[in-house]
Structures are given as structure tokens and as C-alpha cells.
Image (spheres, helix red, strand yellow):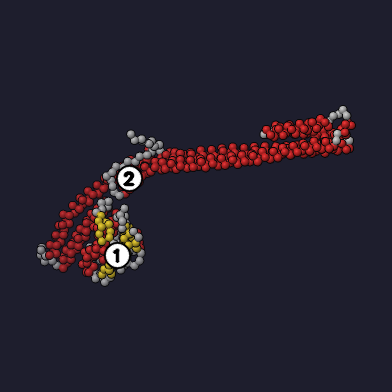
Amino acid sequence: MKLQLGYPRSFRRLLAMGFALVVLPLAVGLVGDAISIRKLSNKSREAVYAALRTTQASRALLENIGAQERAIRQYGVLRDPRLFDAYQTLHAAFTELAGRFAEMSLTAEQRQELATIASGEDKLHAMLGETAAVAARSAVPQESIAAQYLALSAAAQDLLKHNNAVIDGEVESLQRLAEGAERIMVIQLLALLPVAAFLVAGFTRLLAGPVGQLEAAIGGLGAGRFDRRIEVGGPTDLQSLGVQLDRLRLRLMQLEERKNRFLRRVSHELKTPLTALREGSDLLADGTAGPLTAQQREIAAILTDNSQRLRKLIEDLLAYNAADFEQSVLQRQVFPLRELIDAVVDSQRLAFTARGVSVDIDAAPLALDADRERIRTVLDNLLSNAIKYSPPSGTIRIRATKEGGEAVVEVADEGPGIAEEDRDRVFDPFYQGRIPGAGPVKSSGLGLSIAQEHVLAHGGRLLLLPGAGARFQMRLPLQWH
């Protein structure tokens, strides 16, 4: 059982869902990275603050011990009670500082070292603070006091060094955390990019289905293929668009049928009176109904010319209708281009010989994979126009070359060319330029339109080039895809 993928009702909602699905994993990754970076930042800030506080406390202890030593030494020499009071103040500050230090986040070794320093300072204070015998203080050897303070200072120095070692360890730990966060971000990126790519590819394929159906439907309408029903899947609004295109297809098919019926009926209805007109004018011109005067012969000639013109108009109209609605049916074959050019020139040799016009052919040995009869019609129309507009004793030049992957055929005459105001409409059906051409039958204005339709059906181009005279260039692909 095939799984049917449900579409939302709106194409706009489908786009919104697709963008949301693509952005969602990237947003999740960015949020995760932001959280990791925030945690790392907080930990770094806390580590820096803790290291700063422990370092400041260690230095303050070291400075306090030095100040105590100086105060007690001065008191031993000067016997000034104020110096002993200063020492007591320093001791109280040391006790408070050690208490704050102990409340900080310390390692076991740091706490042990701090307890040793505090215990030594207490013992020294108890020895120096005995009030029973002031004179005994003087009996305390200064060397002993200096040695004990030196030991306290050394212990404080060791504590400061240990704090620095702890700071270095914190720095290394933060570095490892940063490297771990970087690895996590890289892993997330490598994991999310394929997910995002998969979602983009899936969503693109999801959109490509209905969009491709619309493109194929519009291309079919442009190519005149009205026999296939148009069905478009996807969201409701795109399905509704497919229904409207199918209605347009049916309408165009009806119009095509009506046009074909009209052209068939017109051609049939006109054949009978046209045949009568031609036979009657031929009988009059031959004198079957009696001898004609010069004026009567002139009138008969006018009837003959106009009947020929009417026949040419009907044939061109039917040919244009076939070229307009049957371009998809091409009878392709491989044939030499030069051979076809020679055949077209031979078929019109009487026409250009009668006007004293010469034809110069310069064609490279090229083989076309195309509908021979349609390309023959194109060349025949281009050569016919060149003969009509060439001056007497003029030269028509036909060139065929290869440029890239295209065969380029150029037909140029030495006539007056095409007026500037007519150049944009020269390929329009039934359009006739301001400069009349020579010949017994007036142009219907359909020859170039039919030629352009045939060239376009082959995937080529029919161009009007600038310059003297009329220069038409046909470009056809050498390989058909």
C-alpha cells in the first residue's frame, strides 16, 4: 500500500511549514550552543572571582603577619603601650581575615595550610599577650619571635603559591571545558547539516511534484496538446489552479475544433464558386464565347489574376492553420542541407530567370535531422520573397554554415529591404509591408509566419538581420534532444 503524503490546504502554509522544518534543527543547535557558552562563561567568571578573592586574602594574611612582626619588634625596643595596642589590632584583623578566608571555596590542602597559619598565629599571640608579667615580655628573645614570624610568613607564602597552583588548575580545567564545548558544537554542526540538507531535499521534492505538474500542463497547452487531462496534486489552492487549467484546456480544444470546422467549411464552400470563376475567365480569355475586344480581354485578365490570388489566399490560410496546430508532429529524417537548397532553387528557376535574377549558393556540407518538407517550405518561402523583392539583374545569396551546435542558413537579396516600421511585425500573420513586391500574385502575408512556425517547431530561430536588402537567417540545432 503506497503511503499518501498529506499536503496542507494552502501553498503558503506549505512554504511556511517547510521553512520551519529546515530552521528548527538549526535553531535547536544554536540554542544548545548558546546554553553551553553561557555555562562556560558563568563558570569562567566564578573561577576568576574565586581565584581573585583567595589571592587577595593570601596576600592580606602575608601583609598582616609582616605588620605584626614589625609592631611587636618596635614594642620590644621602645616599650610603648601604643605599639602593643597596634599589635592587638593587627591580631584582631588577622583573626577576622582568616575567618573570611575559611568561608571561601578552598581545597583540603588550602584549608590545612590556613589552619596551620591561624594556629601558629594564635599561639604566638598567646605567648606575647600574657599580662601577668610585662617584664617577661622583655625576656622573650627577639630572635625567637623573629623565627616564629618567619615561619608564619613562609607558611603564608606557601599558601599563596598553592593558591596560584589552584588558579593554574582552574585555567586548565576551563581550557578543557572550552575544548569540550567546541567539540560538541562541531559534532552538533556535523549532525545538523545533514538533517537540514535532508529536510531541504525532501521539501524541494515535495514542492517539485505539483510545480512540475503545473509546468508540464502549461507547456502542453503552449504546444497545442489538448488531449490530456490536467491534474495537479499538492495543496488545495494548487489543485484548484489545476482544475482551472483543465477548464482552459477544454475551452482551447473547443476553439480549435471550431476553427478547424470553419476553415474546412470555408475552403469547401469557396472551391465551387472559385472553380466557376476560373473556368469562366479562362473561357472568356480563350474566346470560346466569341471574340473579345481589348477592354474585354483586360477585364478577363483581371478576373483570372484575382481568381489566382483568391486560390493562393485559401491555400496559404489552410497551410498556416496546419503549421499552427500540428507543429508537434514532425517527420524527422537525416538529409544533406545542400541537396535540399539545390532542390528549392531548381523549383523556382523559372521565376528568378524570368526576372533576370541570379542565385549564388555557398553551403557547407551539413546534414540536418529535421522534417525535410517543413524545412523545404521555409527555404521556399524565403527564396520566393527574395525573388519578389530583388531588382532586375540582382543577386540572391544563400549561405549555409555551422556555428557551434547549430546550422545557420542565410538568404539575402539586393532589394529595397524592409521598412524600419515593418521590421517588428514582419512575422505576424497576414501582415503586409509597405514596400510592394513584384510578381503576378500579391502576397497574402502568411509565408513568413508559416516559415517561423516551422523553424520554432524544430527548436530553432528565424531572424531578420539588419543591413542592406532583406537578410533572413534560419538557425537550427544540429542535434535533436
Q: Which residue is mark 1?
A: 364
Secondary structure beneath label 1: loop
Point out the tag, 1 or 2, that comes first from the N-terminus: 2
Whether residue 411 is visible here, answered yes or no, is no
> Picture quarter containing residue 51?
top right
In which image quadrant can residue 134 be found? Answer: top right
The structure residue drawn at horizontal position 54% and vertical position 41%, both measured from the top left corner, is: 183
Quadrant of res 407:
bottom left
Helix, strand or loop under label 2 = helix
Q: Mark 1 belongs to which amino acid?
A: Ala
Residue 233 drawn at (x, y percent): 35, 39
Which image quarter is the N terminus in? top left
The residue sitting at the bottom extreme is 393
Is 421 left or right of 78, judged from the image as shown?
left
Is 124 displayed left or right of 186 in the figure? right
- Mark linked to residue 231: none
User: What is the crowding at mark 1: few (fewer than 14 residues within 10 Å), some, or many (at least 20)?
Assistant: some
Q: Name the residue at 24% across, 65% down.
A: 342
**Residue position marked by numbered label 2 in the rendering:** 217
Closer to the eye: label 1 or 2: 1
In the picture as drawn, the residue positioned furthest to the top comes out as: 132
Q: Can the viewer see residue 364 in this picture? A: yes
Q: Position of 28 compared to 466: left or right?
A: right
Looking at the rendered structure, the number of numbered marks drawn on it comes to 2
Q: Position of residue 259 (x, y in %)?
A: 25, 49
CA gap, disc 1 to disc 2?
A: 40 Å
- 165 or 429: nearer the eye? 165
Local crowd size for mark 2, using a 10 Å CA cut-off: few (<14), some (14–19), many (≥20): many
Q: Position of residue 272 (x, y in %)?
A: 16, 54
The x, y position of residue 420, in whole percent, is: 35, 63
Label pair 1/2, CB-CB below 8 angstroms: no
Disc 2 residue type (three-letter): Ala
